[in-house]
Each structure stands twice: as structure tokens, then as C-alpha cells.
Image (cartoon, rainbow, N blue to C red):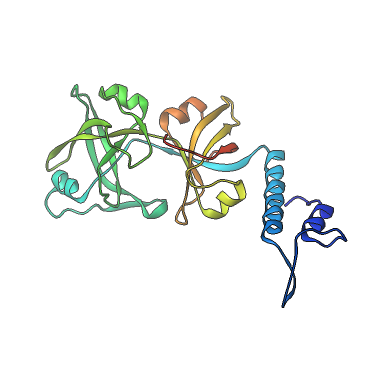
Amino acid sequence: MPALNERKLKAEAGEGKKGLGREWGMDGYKMADSQVERIARMVLEAMGEKQDSQGGYLVPVGVSARHVHLTQEHVEALFGEGYRLTKKKELMGGQFASNEQVTIVGLKLRAIENVRILGPVRSKSQVEVSATDAIKLGVKAPIRESGNVAGSAPIALVGPKGALYLQEGCIIARRHIHMPPKDAAAAGLYDGDVASVRVDKERGVVFHQVQIRVDDSFTLEMHIDTDEANAAKIATGDTVRIIKGERQCGGI
């Protein structure tokens, strides 16, 4: 961490002759809550200066291809009674890529085959596609946070043992960054914040409206879809930099 202003810290802590807000107790000198808050703010500001000098907080990228989340009821409708998803690859947050795939079909009977299902099962089924996929399927998929499917586009799914029609559930996932608490604290960000992210590549761009999601189960990674990755000419494993963050007040 960069060097802090020692004189300022001493003044805040009350070590100088004119220290403010001193409190005395059985254990001797204590700082008032206001002093603690101001010193914490100075530390965070110093951390922010370090990030700025390096061009922002560094985050690895994960490119997310089209995929499906299903309820157990819908798994059985597509794969047979009593069927359980089988694990192909572990993902963050307790999720996994399954071996199972389905075909998704739009309203104009345009289809995309071999769309992978992610587990475990959820309380609501949803299909996440790119904007290009949505055009191909002929659906008007809104940009949404994962799980927010109310009023989203209808879509049909076809599996080896059956088919089903979702009246809502097809979305374009809002770009977002998964952060464990330690990285969120270091970047000065909180769950629900919105950030801007810079891509320093040949086709350098700045992604705005990037949602911050914080949880102990997360690994630091920015998730974008294939359209966004192609536009910036980046791939899974590349890095980007958070250059600005804001509190999110209200809806998306």
C-alpha cells in the first residue's frame, strides 16, 4: 500500500498537542468513532490512489457462451422422469457445467442446437443468449440480471425425451463482475454497485454499466457474452481494469 501522510494520521489519532476528539477510559487513550472513520477513509483513499496510478483495479475475464438454467421439473420434462444433471466441469459459486445439452427454438422456429445446461437446478428456468443469438432466434430478449426473468422473452427447449415452452425466461445477461469480499474492499466496491471497465487491447473499449456482485463463494472474474468479447477482441483469461464505480440506487 502506498505511504500515507504520517502527519495527517497523527493528527487524526490525537497524537499531536492539538488532537481532537480524545476519549479516556480504563484502558487509557481511545479514538472516537469519528476518528476511526476518518482514518479508514484515508486508507481507502490511499488504496484508490494506488489503483489509479496503475490504471485501475485488474480483473480477469470469463467469456460466457449461451446456456440454460433449469428447474428439476423441467430437467425431467426434457430428459425423462427422475433424471439428474451430470457434472462436466466445476464453476464458481457451487455451479457446474453439465454434460447435458438442449436445442433452443425461437418463435419463428429458428433453432440453436447443443446449448449447454448449467447446474445445479434452480427455482426458475432461464435461457441466456447473446444479442446475435436473439436475432437469429427471432426473440426480443431483454438485458437482465441473471434470475430476473419476469416479462422476458418466450422460448422453447427440446431435449432427448421431450420439449417445453417457457412463456418467459429468455434474456441477454447483463455484464457483471463476480468479486469475493476482499477484492471488493480493495477496489472500494460493494454488491450492487455499477462500474466502468477499460479494455487495453488492440480494439480498446470501455464497458459501462457493469454490475458488481459480491459473495464469499465467488472468484474474481468479469463475465461478458460472446458479442461483447468479439467487439473488444478479448477472450477468457485476458484482463481488464475497473476505472470507475458508482452506488446503484434504484433499478437497472
Residue drawn 50% across and 45% down? Answer: 221
Residue drawn 72% across and 50% down? Answer: 42
Eyeballing the image, is 209 above or below 12?
A: above
Between 35 and 118, the one nearer to me in the picture: 35
User: In the current view of this chain or complex, which residue is farthest to the right?
Assistant: 17
Eyeballing the image, is 244 above or below 29?
A: above
Between 236 and 244, the one nearer to me in the picture: 244
Q: How many marks?
A: 0
Residue drawn 17% across and 40% down? Answer: 159
**Where residue 236 appears, x then y in whole percent?**
48, 39
Report if residue 249 is visible in the image. Answer: yes
Report if residue 235 is visible in the image. Answer: no
**Where residue 155 appears, x then y in whole percent?**
22, 32
Residue drawn 22% across and 24% down? Answer: 110
Image quadrant where one finds the C terminus: top left
- Lateral position of residue 100 relative to residue 143, left or right: left
Q: Residue 163: which quarter of the image?
A: top left
**Where residue 32 appears, x then y in whole percent?**
70, 62
Between 36 and 163, the one nearer to me in the picture: 36
**Where residue 79 appears, x then y in whole percent?**
16, 46
- Lateral position of residue 75 relative to residue 250, left or right: left
Between 109 and 191, the one nearer to me in the picture: 191
User: In the current view of this chain or complex, which residue is farthest to the bottom?
Assistant: 26
